[in-house]
Image: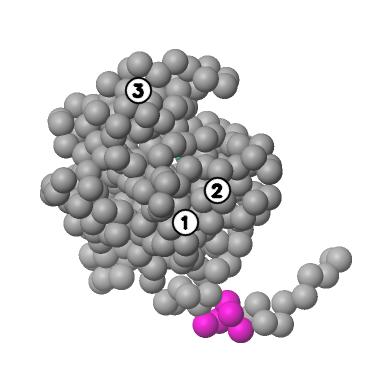
């Protein structure tokens, strides 16, 4: 099967972000900054870099900060223009120019599958790339592009995977490589999915990360998926049903640099790793970091 590369992306941003309380009382974690750029903008940039120009953001009820961030700010722009602040102006306009963004509200955070289910009208029969905004992929490394290529070749479901080793795998959704598939290869055919397998019983060490390409059939599969743990509708359950019904599933194994900004410690590490490359402050920060020694006071 050969088809077109997907042109649309859904980004879920309606979770409670409990690991980032108290900030997330008022600020969605997707707006948490890497220096000054929200993680959500970085992920929309990744979609745009891969020729995805239409983005649907799933947002939570009553929270307007995300919509405001991606809307034009004419007064601010006029003030920056009057000052001749070209760099400021470009930075303020960038989020409004990356893609055509639309919004849908998820009234209650009932899980990733439930959030993705809100994309049916937006997808309108086309495949969707789904990008989780707390998984950042370094812009020097490629994951989404190869995934879109695999979709164009095989259709079905395409998953972003990383090899996390035998200990960590029980924290992740895990894939079962198809018979004859080379688990060391860059593209792996998959015969089944297992959510958080017991250590020692995992069928592979390949974990699903926050990049998916999903075919239009995913919406019917989500409608038929019963809520699982915590009343949440799990995307893995819906994908598993499609897989068992014969939809092809492939994984692209990512061996590049990835930052998990949904975890507090990993978020702080990501800020440091990306701040040392920042065009304005990177060199000074790196010099300071070299000499930095924590003190008691
Ligand atoms: P996470 O599980 O990392 O986000 O979901 P969370 O639930 O907000 O975080 P914690 O665990 O409470 O700290 C991954 C992505 O899916 C979105 C989240 O906003 C996040 O971007 N999500 C999750 C939804 O949009 N709706 C949901 O019901 C659940």
Residue at x 19% of width, y 26% of height = 121
At x 48%, y 43%, the residue is 175
* Label 2: which secondary element: loop
Q: Position of residue 289 (x, y in %)?
A: 65, 77
Q: Residues within 10 Å of mark 1 (few under 14, many from 20)?
A: some
Q: Position of residue 258 (x, y in %)?
A: 49, 60
Q: Is residue 37 left or right of residue 204?
A: left
Check disc 3 and report its element: helix, strand or loop: helix
Q: Is residue 37 above or below residue 127?
A: below
Is 102 inside the magenta-drawn segment? Answer: no
Q: Which residue is mark 3?
A: 222
C-alpha gap between disc 1 and disc 2: 8 Å
Quadrant placement of the C terminus: bottom right
How far, Cα to Cα, is label 3 from label 2? 25 Å
Q: Which residues are magenta?
A: 283-287
Q: From this view, report whether residue 92 is shown above or below residue 177.
A: below
Residue 112 visible in the shown view = no
Q: Nearer the viewer, residue 52 or 216?
A: 216
**Chief secondary structure of the magenta span?**
helix
Ligand 1 closer than 8 Å to the CB at disc 3? no
**Residue highlighted by disc 2:** 204
Report the disc number at residue 183: 1
> Along the polypeptide, which appears first: circle 1 or circle 2?
1
- Residue 286: within the magenta? yes
């Amino acid at each position: 099967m050969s088809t077109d590369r997907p042109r649309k992306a859904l980004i879920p941003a309606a979770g409670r972000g409990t690991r980032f309380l108290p900030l997330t009382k008022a600020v969605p974690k997707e707006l948490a900054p890497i220096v000054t750029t929200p993680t959500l903008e970085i992920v929309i940039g990744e979609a745009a870099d891969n020729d995805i120009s239409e983005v649907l953001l799933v947002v939570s009820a009553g929270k307007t900060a995300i919509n405001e961030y991606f809307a034009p700010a004419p007064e601010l722009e006029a003030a920056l223009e009057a000052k001749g602040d070209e760099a400021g102006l470009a930075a303020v306009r960038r989020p409004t120019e990356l893609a055509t963004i639309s919004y849908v509200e998820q009234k209650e955070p009932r899980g990733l599958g439930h959030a993705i289910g809100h994309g049916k009208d937006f997808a309108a029969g086309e495949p969707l790339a789904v990008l989780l905004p707390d998984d950042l992929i370094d812009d020097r490394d490629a994951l989404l592009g190869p995934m879109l290529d695999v979709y164009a070749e095989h259709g079905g479901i395409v998953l972003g995977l990383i090899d996390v080793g035998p200990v960590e795998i029980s924290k992740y959704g895990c894939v079962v490589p198809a018979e004859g598939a080379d688990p060391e290869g860059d593209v792996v055919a998959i015969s089944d999915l297992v959510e958080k397998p017991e250590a020692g019983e995992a069928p592979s060490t390949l974990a699903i990360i926050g990049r998916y390409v999903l075919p239009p059939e995913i919406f019917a599969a989500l409608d038929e998926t019963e809520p699982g743990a915590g009343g949440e509708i799990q995307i893995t359950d819906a994908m598993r049903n499609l897989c068992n019904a014969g939809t092809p599933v492939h994984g692209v194994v990512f061996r590049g640099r990835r930052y998990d900004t949904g975890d507090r410690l990993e978020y702080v590490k990501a800020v440091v790793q990306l701040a040392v490359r920042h065009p304005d402050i990177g060199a000074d920060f790196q010099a300071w970091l070299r000499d930095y020694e924590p003190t008691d006071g």
